[in-house]
Every structure is written in structure tokens, then in C-alpha cells.
Image: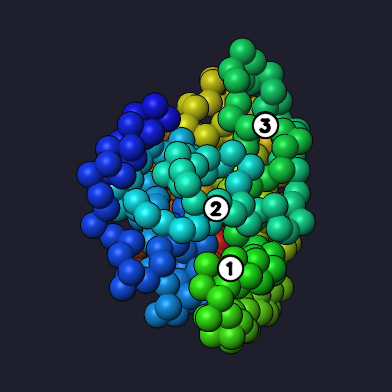
């Protein structure tokens, strides 16, 4: 795929880009929606901030189309999470600086699941971001960590457009105030929950869970995009019973089938959590986090 990307970009350069002229705003490409939403708000009207991952697509193992790559040609800066989660953005950023904001915050390691994750997937090679003990890349699910990320974004945008430094700093303070208010609101809601144990489809909720006192008893697909083995499903069912989990949550970017089967066999509700957003009703970072909080509250309060 990288060879294809390189050839495409070379062709675009040879033919000349339709963007990037003297009168155009500098372009910034951002890998996933939660980062994109914060970056565009910090940038205001001074920069052209583009989203790489189309809404509805999974942040894992994405393969940009030639049309999507052409749209990002000429970007001066790329903003990604890092930790190999969104490494698909790197070929698009050839010739531009790529900032991995996940490296700017304190991370948690991916937990070694107590339900035999390593044995259940013996013989499979996990992606770097799925490997137990590696840094969990889903840092954006914690609003407190995103306050630090906003500071990083402010600095990187100022490096692209020095004249906008003060505007970026002012916008950044507004965004951070919104994130603090969001964090306070969710923390207050979480304190009213009488139940605290859930099962998730993918390992995207650990930072949120840690921040707001939720326990994840098991993960249906510890390896993104790899269907769990029958042995592993049995271990998940045992963990649900042992932890008295209140519900299992799928994600809109993945097949619901395995989650439906396990929820039915376990006799618990199947809900949905969205770690990426960018769709109607989840078209800002705050709306995304609050939407997920609504879904959890339905079964935990």
C-alpha cells in the first residue's frame, strides 16, 4: 500500500497541485475526528484543517483511497495519535511534519486481560497498538488528557502560522475551558451510577473507564478486526458472570454479530459506544463523549 501511495503522491506533485497556492490557507491534516474537532477549533479561520479518516470508518487498519489522499496533498502539518494506531496517515504526510499527540500525554499500558487473551489468540500477531503492555493509544477518550493535547496543538499550529500564535492561544483556552466543564459534568454524572461493570467490544474505553470509575470485565475483540475464538468467547462469558457485568457494548465501526451472540448467551443488554464520532449527534468532541456517557448511564444508573 505504501508503494501505491508514494507513486500517487509523486504523480500529483508532477502534475501540480490545485491547492497550496500563495493565497491559500496552510493545510493541516488530522487523522481522526476527535483530534480534528479540537484542531479546527483552535485553528479558527486561519488554517485549512482536513480530516483524514472518514466518519464511520474504524481508526484501526484504515487504507486511504487515492481520492482521499489527493485531497490532502500539500498539507504542511499532520496530527495523529501515534503508537501505530493511525500509522496509515504517515504515507499521506510525506514531506510534512507529523505530530503524534499521544506521545505528549501520560499513557496507560494495555492491560493483560485476566481472561486468557494471550492464549485465546495464540499464533496471531497482534497489531502494535493491541499488544498487552504497549501504550494504549485511545488517549482521546479522557477529556483531562485532551487538555494537554490542546496545548500541543496550539504550539504546532503556531509553528505553521506564526502570525496566528495569539489567536491559536486564545482559541485553545476556550477549548480547554470547554473540556474542563465536560470533565466536571461527566464526573458528577458518574458519581450517581450504582453499577460499574461492563464488557466492551474493543479496547477503546480504558481511559474513560479509569477516569470515571467504570470497570471493564472483558473485551470481546482484544485484537481489532480479529473475530474471537470459541475458547475466548467462553472466557468472556465466564468473566461476565464473575463480574456481574451490566451490559455489553459494541462499536458502530465493527460487526455487531459477535457482540449480539455473546450478549444473548450471557443474558445482558447490548448497547453501543462510539470512540470516533464525526457523525450526526456526535459532531463535536464534547457531543461524542456525552453521547457515550448517555449510553453507559442507561445501564449503570
Q: Position of residue 198 (x, y in %)?
A: 62, 50
Tell me if residue 296 can be seen.
yes
Q: Secondary structure at mark 1?
A: helix
Q: Is residue 3 left or right of residue 12?
A: right
How far apart in space, not on screen, are marks 1 and 3 (Cα)?
34 Å
Q: Is residue 99 above or below residue 116?
A: below
How far apart in space, not on screen, are marks 1 and 2 (Cα)?
10 Å
Q: Which residue is mark 3?
A: 131
Residue sitting nearer the eye, 199 or 172: 172
Q: Is residue 196 left or right of residue 268?
A: right
Q: Is residue 11 above or below residue 205?
A: above
Q: Quadrant of the C terminus?
A: bottom right
> Are the residues tagged 1 and 3 within 8 Å (C-beta)?
no
Q: Which residue is mark 1?
A: 159
Q: Quadrant of the N terminus?
A: top left
> Are the residues tagged 1 and 2 within 8 Å (C-beta)?
yes
Q: Earlier in the sequence, mark 1 or mark 2?
A: 2
> Are the residues tagged 2 and 3 within 8 Å (C-beta)?
no
Local packing at callout 1 (Cα closer than 10 Å; few below 14, some 14-19, many 20+) is few
Please report the residue visible at 34 percent of the width from the left and 40 percent of the height from the top.
Answer: 9
Q: Is residue 42 above or below residue 124?
A: below
Q: Is residue 139 above or below residue 286?
A: above
Please report the residue visible at 25 percent of the width from the left and 49 percent of the height from the top.
Answer: 16
Residue sitting nearer the eye, 161 or 142: 161
Q: Position of residue 238 (x, y in %)?
A: 66, 32
Q: Secondary structure at mark 2?
A: strand
Marking on residue 97 = 2
Tell me if residue 256 can be seen.
no
**Quarter-of-image position of residue 179:** bottom right
Of the residues tagged 2 and 3, which is closer to the observer?
A: 2
Q: Earlier in the sequence, mark 1 or mark 3?
A: 3
Amino acid at each position: 500500500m505504501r508503494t501505491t501511495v508514494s507513486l500517487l503522491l509523486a504523480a500529483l506533485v508532477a502534475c501540480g497541485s490545485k491547492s497550496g497556492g500563495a493565497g491559500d490557507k496552510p493545510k493541516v491534516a488530522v487523522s481522526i475526528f476527535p483530534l480534528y474537532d479540537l484542531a479546527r477549533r483552535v485553528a479558527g479561520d486561519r488554517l485549512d484543517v482536513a480530516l483524514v479518516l472518514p466518519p464511520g470508518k474504524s481508526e484501526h487498519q484504515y487504507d486511504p483511497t487515492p481520492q482521499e489522499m489527493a485531497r490532502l496533498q500539500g498539507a504542511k502539518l499532520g496530527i495523529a495519535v501515534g503508537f501505530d494506531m493511525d500509522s496509515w496517515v504517515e504515507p499521506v504526510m510525506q514531506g510534512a511534519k507529523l505530530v503524534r499527540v499521544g506521545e505528549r500525554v501520560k499513557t496507560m499500558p494495555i492491560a493483560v486481560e485476566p481472561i486468557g487473551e494471550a492464549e485465546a489468540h495464540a499464533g496471531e500477531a497482534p497489531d502494535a497498538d493491541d499488544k498487552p503492555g504497549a501504550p494504549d493509544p485511545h488517549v482521546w477518550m479522557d477529556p483531562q488528557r485532551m487538555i494537554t493535547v490542546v496545548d500541543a496543538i496550539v504550539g504546532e499550529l503556531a509553528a505553521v502560522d506564526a502570525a496566528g500564535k495569539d489567536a491559536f492561544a486564545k482559541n485553545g483556552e476556550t477549548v480547554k475551558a470547554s473540556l474542563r466543564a465536560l470533565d466536571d459534568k461527566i464526573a458528577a454524572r458518574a458519581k450517581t451510577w450504582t453499577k460499574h461493570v461492563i464488557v466492551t467490544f474493543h479496547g477503546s474505553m480504558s481511559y474513560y473507564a479509569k477516569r470515571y470509575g467504570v470497570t471493564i470485565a472483558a473485551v470481546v475483540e482484544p485484537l481489532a478486526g480479529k473475530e474471537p475464538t470459541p475458547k475466548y468467547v467462553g472466557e468472556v462469558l465466564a468473566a461476565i458472570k464473575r463480574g456481574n457485568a451490566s451490559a455489553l457494548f459494541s462499536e458502530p465501526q465493527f460487526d455487531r454479530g459477535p457482540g449480539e451472540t455473546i450478549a444473548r448467551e450471557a443474558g445482558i443488554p447490548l448497547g453501543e459506544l462510539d470512540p470516533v464520532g464525526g457523525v450526526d449527534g456526535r459532531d463535536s468532541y464534547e457531543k461524542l463523549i456525552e453521547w457515550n456517557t448517555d449510553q453507559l448511564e442507561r445501564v449503570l444508573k
